[in-house]
Amino acid sequence: MFFASDNAGPAHPKVIEALSKANEGYAMGYGADAIMDRVRDKIRDVFEAPQAAVYLVATGTAANSILLATMAQPWQTIFCSPMAHIHEDECNAPEFYSGAKLTIVPAENAKMTPETLRASIEGEETRGVHGPQRGPVSITQVTEKGTVHSVNEIKALTGVASDYGLKCHLDGARFANALSFLGCTAAEMTWKAGIDAVSFGGTKNGLLGVEACVMFDPELAWEFELRRKRGGHLFSKHRYLSAQMDAYLADDLWLDMAGNANARCAQLTEGLRGIDHVTLSFEPEANMIFFQMPRAEHARVLAGGATYYVMDGDHTSGDPDRLLTGRLVTDWSMTEDVIESFLALMRG
Amino acid sequence: MFFASDNAGPAHPKVIEALSKANEGYAMGYGADAIMDRVRDKIRDVFEAPQAAVYLVATGTAANSILLATMAQPWQTIFCSPMAHIHEDECNAPEFYSGAKLTIVPAENAKMTPETLRASIEGEETRGVHGPQRGPVSITQVTEKGTVHSVNEIKALTGVASDYGLKCHLDGARFANALSFLGCTAAEMTWKAGIDAVSFGGTKNGLLGVEACVMFDPELAWEFELRRKRGGHLFSKHRYLSAQMDAYLADDLWLDMAGNANARCAQLTEGLRGIDHVTLSFEPEANMIFFQMPRAEHARVLAGGATYYVMDGDHTSGDPDRLLTGRLVTDWSMTEDVIESFLALMRG
Amino acid sequence: MFFASDNAGPAHPKVIEALSKANEGYAMGYGADAIMDRVRDKIRDVFEAPQAAVYLVATGTAANSILLATMAQPWQTIFCSPMAHIHEDECNAPEFYSGAKLTIVPAENAKMTPETLRASIEGEETRGVHGPQRGPVSITQVTEKGTVHSVNEIKALTGVASDYGLKCHLDGARFANALSFLGCTAAEMTWKAGIDAVSFGGTKNGLLGVEACVMFDPELAWEFELRRKRGGHLFSKHRYLSAQMDAYLADDLWLDMAGNANARCAQLTEGLRGIDHVTLSFEPEANMIFFQMPRAEHARVLAGGATYYVMDGDHTSGDPDRLLTGRLVTDWSMTEDVIESFLALMRG
Amino acid sequence: MFFASDNAGPAHPKVIEALSKANEGYAMGYGADAIMDRVRDKIRDVFEAPQAAVYLVATGTAANSILLATMAQPWQTIFCSPMAHIHEDECNAPEFYSGAKLTIVPAENAKMTPETLRASIEGEETRGVHGPQRGPVSITQVTEKGTVHSVNEIKALTGVASDYGLKCHLDGARFANALSFLGCTAAEMTWKAGIDAVSFGGTKNGLLGVEACVMFDPELAWEFELRRKRGGHLFSKHRYLSAQMDAYLADDLWLDMAGNANARCAQLTEGLRGIDHVTLSFEPEANMIFFQMPRAEHARVLAGGATYYVMDGDHTSGDPDRLLTGRLVTDWSMTEDVIESFLALMRG
């Protein structure tokens, strides 16, 4: 009963197997391996983007930061939501790589709205050379609160950006979970909706640690390569990144894994709705649930063997009725039985 | 017959096996996994440094750059040899992470000498606030030309640094190969010889991609952690880094692998000495050989199925007698037979 | 009738005279001039801080950015108000110099409150290594909206900072205007109230372009000097900065100039209160007034020969009754007559 | 008898007068002053470059660093001589602003040669993404050793740069002295010779502190403005920079001042040639002399009331016959009599 994070679960056995298979003989390093050629083609196929530049890095923070550095100038500001991973969870990495600052756009259900985005953009660049200049917009899909932008919601945001000539980045750490929820194509959720570059996550969905960076306009591909190397993110034994992504994309493994994580989350959501002392904070749409529950219940459940994060404070002492927010994340490897066991524990 | 680089060879099967074994159930992320606790202890044991701060990253450039950033201030200069990896092969990463610049110290056999280092240090900080201030010294062991500093040579360099109150970093991308050559302990080659921090390489010696950063003075450990995260180098599924290093250090696998690479290099060196049209550029002491040979011979050997780098230009056309430098690197997986086959090809 | 900014007015003739007087013969450069020795002593006297480190730079952005860079680490966040000059008007300079990011603390009357500051500090550093770490607090005095923190208000903010071990910076671009309003001493408004470092402005108050950086704890003085040089802000012919500041501090010229600017602002405020179509946005306490007035009135007054900024849009067309905000800034050189003429024009 | 530096002398009285005259009434800030319009036109005239972008900053380090930041990418290396001011005397400012590193090109008479430049360029970018990429070439005119590149020498260097598609920067801290020596036009010494951007110095030649940045291709003008602001180098009361440059260019004052400095240097050089115990290190061509003299002679002359730098160590004790290098710099304000007095003292 481990719901702390989708990066706490195991990698899919097929991924380990792929590593083992890739581990034969010699291979050129630094992305010149034969597997990477296949991966590049597959990702271009998935995105229906034959010209796209495709690169692999090992962490989501690297993917976001290097992509944003190619999209933003050091005197600009990047627009994102208050709970954006790039703002809250990357210890200034996007600023370090790009030199830009971030403008926090008010959000509803963890999503910027066209209105708040427009107002934030209007609020910048009103001071000539004195203030930061308008830079790219970064959208997280699945959001950090487990909600998913519809394709139309993405289009509405990129439409606002486009009114000001700004580019759009998609932080897709949980890209597969979003796609699985929406039932659309990768192209529809990205470039057809106005997205210029994507952090295409694999780590949270069954890989050991690989994210693809996809730039639909390959113009800055060489700059990306130099920034990746300058950041220390170019792997010499690159084949082991390639092999993971290769297995991920084979036979829709990535969508199957995300589908199961989402299904377990739906099962869990349904069960939680039937528990009186539980209130959902957001409508769970992918594989993540935020919920409120009295402190004493949290203490009981965690003592009972479940693992998850309590977001806002100490669950071990104080007023037993105080409401605290918990976060539950399901992953590809979770079974129906585990969900049922956890729900039984939650019910008390 | 693949001698292009020791990062082109496979990982050791035991390492893949360790990954597979680590891939069970849930594990806390970001370095809080149980395997990392064991790795930290093992590395402290290897270095006889119970207080050392120990962290893992996935690339050598990251290891060097983050360590140097904790050791150097943005207004300082880092002293290194003209062929230092941090100078020639990291696309400004050390400067990016630290803000410091590099001062190139003349070298013999790819090693700074106490005299050249002292002269270079004396040459800086003669201009008060105007010039860069003296920063740390970075020594590569094995050097980029395949030579190895004796313990006394390291002591002589760190002694000069110490005269000016400067700290010393060891770029140990091929740490195991050096240790295997010298036959001393890790402690003797590092902190007992005046080294403050080590990039302890694994990638070039049988891992998929892991380097340990070892700081003998743990005072800046928390700063290191923040810099690692800010650089995007903190792995969420950290157990897969830990597992590699765990297997590496188990039963002296790391020393066995380096020992074999060095033995194959020695075998190859001896063979090359017997070939008239070959001249060794440096005395090969670990697993890397630089040699000179007429252009036409290079063309013949490479056409014959061998793979290695020709460092200084086109081997396919022009004067057949022009001497060109080749680089041969052996790795842990190489057999005596492969060396003999290659030597046969070289002899022509 | 020029109210656009206090940096649009002339320098005091005594300052020009001091430049002329300083322009005799040779003087050591880079701050080693004899006038600087006197200035350093005077500023230490003004602040009753005999140990303080004192440096001069030519712009407020440089003063703020270099000071904050000595106070903040690249993985931290600096707390400031939404209208802080360092956030809105320095084109990412504080981020460039420090590497840190900014956390925007909600404000009332352009002042952070102890409650909003505490909540913002509490909101950071809840995520271990993942989020930015808490850094210094920067307070603007006079605020960007013309209000002035009382000494107790400053103490309340620095008290909150101190609860978390955070240092405090005062952006005193209009330091003299604040002091003149409060009638306290420079020491009372700064280190006795918990401030660690001050940007002590001169440019907006009758100098050509000089700001003093005052660090009450001189520990990082040498770092400041290196950061100043590295930013290109060390003047070779430093005597011309020294001479300006020397004249500024002689015979309380600085306080006289600020006193007149404030008095003219008070005169102007009183007059505006008597005009029906004018509403003051904030209580003007120093030398700056924000006011609301129908668009058509703005158009009329500006056409009538006055110069000031309309903050929120086009005053030349559209609904004549639309309320727009104007900003009026008085400076040391303004006469009572000019104020009266402007008020007459405003009345219509 | 003050020969320490040309930034130790006074500003020309006409410059102070211009400041005084500019100090009337109100003026728009940040470069929008009317004097700047005139200055921009004058500089375009001087350079016969009607399209050039022209900006003012207050220090040479700022001028060099901001210009180079517009010309170099963070993954590139800037080519310069071993004694380049940007390498030795700017405390990492060019690296700070640009993110690039510097490649030191061997020099003769403080000048890179076409051969050494070509070899250095050839030495970079041989390693694909691994090493720094080739960036701009920076030439200092007058060199840091007092020699002057002929127009043909500049052309030869820019020609090599052009072979690799690299841009060229001229650090003209002593631009006027070079022009006065060569007797050519500003255009001939710059864009007609292949220079793309110039730091056009005024501070060392009679101003208080102003350098013009001239970009012959105005494409990156707006980027320059943003980088200047982000560096804290945009002056609010900009008219005081404009006024200095305005006076500088009026009636060829700048050339007259440089002419006198050069003439005094020539007079001094001729006198020194007649002194047995003096050896000139370089052929003085502008306003700077490096010479060797026995230690005891230095001690005697300095004790006798002269001020200049001894570059290589203690002149107060040790072997009286040890040869030490001194540096003498003449400035616009120096008289023939002072030179004669100094020569008399030198002769002993």
Image (cartoon, coloured by chain):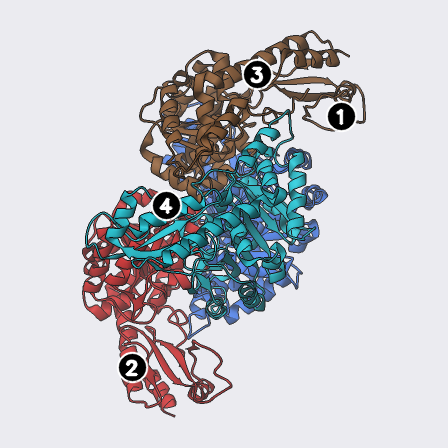
Chain colours: A blue, B red, C brown, D cyan
Q: Are marks 3 and 2 in contact (CB under 8 Å)?
A: no
Q: Which mark is residue C261?
A: 3
Are there few (<14), some (14-19), or many (20+) residues within 10 Å of tag 2? many
**Amino acid identity at mark 3:** Ala
Q: Are marks 4 and 3 on the same chain?
A: no
Alpha carbon of mark 3 to alpha carbon of mark 1: how far?
Answer: 27 Å
**Chain of the residue under the numbered disc 3 shown in the image:** C
- Tell me which label, 3 or 1, sits earlier in the chain: 3
Tell which subunit mark 1 falls on: C
Foreground mark, 3 or 1? Answer: 3
Give residue D341's mark.
4
Name the amino acid type tagged 2: Thr
Decide which of C190, C185 is in the foreground and name it.
Answer: C185
Q: Residue C315, labelled with which disc?
A: 1
Q: Visible in this render: residue A132?
A: no
Query: D264 or B278: which is nearer to us?
Result: D264
How many C-alpha atoms fall within 10 Å of the one at disc 1: few (<14), some, or many (≥20)? many
Residue B269, numbered circle: 2
For mark 4, does the 10 Å Cα neighbourhood hold few (<14), some (14 to 19), or many (20 or more) residues?
few
Disc 1 residue type (three-letter) = His
The kind of secondary structure element at disc 4 is: helix
Residue D271 at least partly seen: yes
Q: Nearer the viewer, mark 3 or mark 2?
A: 3
Q: Amino acid at mark 4?
A: Ser
Secondary structure category for the residue under label 1 = loop
Residue under the point 45% across and 70% down: A21
Q: Position of residue B237 (x, y in %)?
A: 42, 52
Kindly report which numbered mark, 4 or 1, lies closer to the viewer in this rendering.
4
